[in-house]
Amino acid sequence: MGSSFQAPKGVNEYVPPRADLFYAIRQAFAEQARLAGYGYLELAVFEDTQLFKRGVGESTDVVSKEMYTFEDRGGRSLTLRPEFTAGVVRSVLEHGLHKGAQPVKIWTTGPAFRAERPQQGRYRQFYQLDLEAIGSEDPQVDAETIAIAWNWYRELGLTQVRLLLNSLGCKECRPAYRARLQEFLRTLDLDEATRARIEINPLRVLDDKRPEVRDQVADAPLMADHLCAACKAHHDRVRELLTDLGIGWEDTPRLVRGLDYYTRTTYEFDHPLLGAQSGIGGGGRYDGLSEDIGGPPLPGIGFGLGLDRTILALEAEGAVFTAPSRCEVFGVPLGETAEREIFTLVAELRRAGIAADMSYGSKKLKGAMKDADRSGAAYALILGERDIAAGAAQVKDLASGDQVAVPLGEIVTMLKERLS
Ligand code: HAM
């Protein structure tokens, strides 16, 4: 029986043991970010609503339909972050980090909130790993960030991730392309909502999944064929660098992302086993975002990786990445004196870096051994009155059932050796 309450609809919670995996893959990412020189940022969970309107764009679904916006007691309009990038740039500017070395390399993680229709892989509270490099236009930075995500997927054991790559041009070449695309789209036979979209965000029409729209836009002009010389050189360089790093990609000229700030390099990580919600991560450049929110010109690039979908991908592939054990040794004390002895031994084991736990509540042998089996420990440490008299404890290998008596003073060393 639960309580009278449930978590709100669409809130994706993690409880052990799945939450242990969630935490472990996040830790693995933290290490990848550290190795590439990215510092950790703990970011505001809610922001001034205008930040997202101006940063992410009012024409996007995320801003126009999916934000959790509320008024606080002082009458300010606040919004739970639907993504991190706008907040990260706001924070970098607010704290003057861009006045130091550039690019400013930052990563952060936590929940994000979008009022979407919940289904497998799509939640209202979901979790991202977000990494941003702010202050450089160098294509090497584009390739570096992609490589960080790529290495992480590899480390987790995912083998089927695809990198879908595109360039969305810049403020020099995109307006002309946009106008051309609009001209083309206006000649098509489309429903009213889609016609409206042509005027607001024509690139999104290219991304429409409906077959009747897809067929009609098959011959639409593509950004890739209308890049200015600088954008083309940038895009070619990014692809050369990815080749140097041994990272494969698929050129995806129709890839358009759901957020307005993207320029130049844009990409998605896609997982073929996840059905409709196959985008497990995505990112790109946002060279105009800082100015959009009132800051100085400051180019940037980064990505957001969906932790929820990454876990689903791990499960779908049957990948073997596992969380470190929460319990390697489990103490089974029989009697009051043994309890005190084991309690201290467990503390000693923990100090020695061994995950240890014990049976609480003065249980009998059978109940305490059941706890030991449930704990997932490799060894049980059993201590009875007779063992105390002999100055030893029984170390039982829970997989094989083998048991040996080990002098109390040697237990930590012995278990450390066995578990290494
Ligand atoms: P995004 O594509 O909107 O990009 O989200 C990134 C990832 O978050 C998606 O690929 C997906 O895995 C996950 N995600 C998004 N919405 C949901 C949801 N409702 N439920 C579960 N997972 C979800 C951004 O957010 C950009 N800020 C990424 C970025 C960083 N671009 C540059 N820097």
Image (spheres, rainbow, N blue to C red):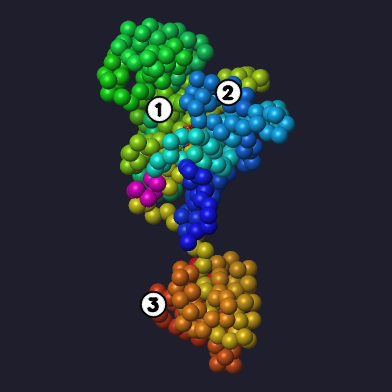
Q: Residue at point 34% right, 48% down? A: 317
Q: From what the image shows, is residue 313 above or below residue 239?
A: below
Mark 2 or mark 3: name the one nearer the start of the chain. Answer: 2
Real-space CA distance between mark 2 and mark 1, rounded to the nearest whole angstrom: 26 Å
Can you identify the residue that label 2 sits on?
A: 53
Badge 2 amino acid: Lys
Q: From what the image shows, is residue 337 above or below residue 44?
A: below
Q: From what the image shows, is residue 413 above or below residue 355?
A: below
Q: Magenta segment, which residues? A: 312-317
Mark 2 or mark 1: name the one nearer the start of the chain. Answer: 2
Asked if one can make out residue 287 in the rendered structure from this viewpoint, the answer is no
Q: Indicate if the residue with disc 2 has its beta carbon within 8 Å of ligand 1.
A: no
Q: Quadrant of residue 199?
A: top left
Q: Are marks 2 and 3 in contact (CB under 8 Å)?
A: no
Can you identify the residue that label 3 sits on?
A: 400
Real-space CA distance between mark 2 and mark 3, rounded to the nearest whole angstrom: 61 Å
Residue 284 x/y as whole percent = 49, 27
341 or 80: nearer the viewer: 80
Asked if one can make out residue 203 in the rendered structure from this viewpoint, the answer is yes
Q: Residue at point 38% right, 6% down? A: 183
Q: Secondary structure at mark 3?
A: loop
Crowdedness near tag 2: few (<14), some (14–19) or many (≥20) residues, C-alpha within 10 Å:
some
The label number, if any, that marks residue 165 in the structure image: 1
Task: State which mark lies toward you, 2 or 3.
Answer: 2
Crowdedness near tag 3: few (<14), some (14–19) or many (≥20) residues, C-alpha within 10 Å:
few
Q: Secondary structure at mark 2?
A: helix
Q: Quadrant of residue 190?
A: top left
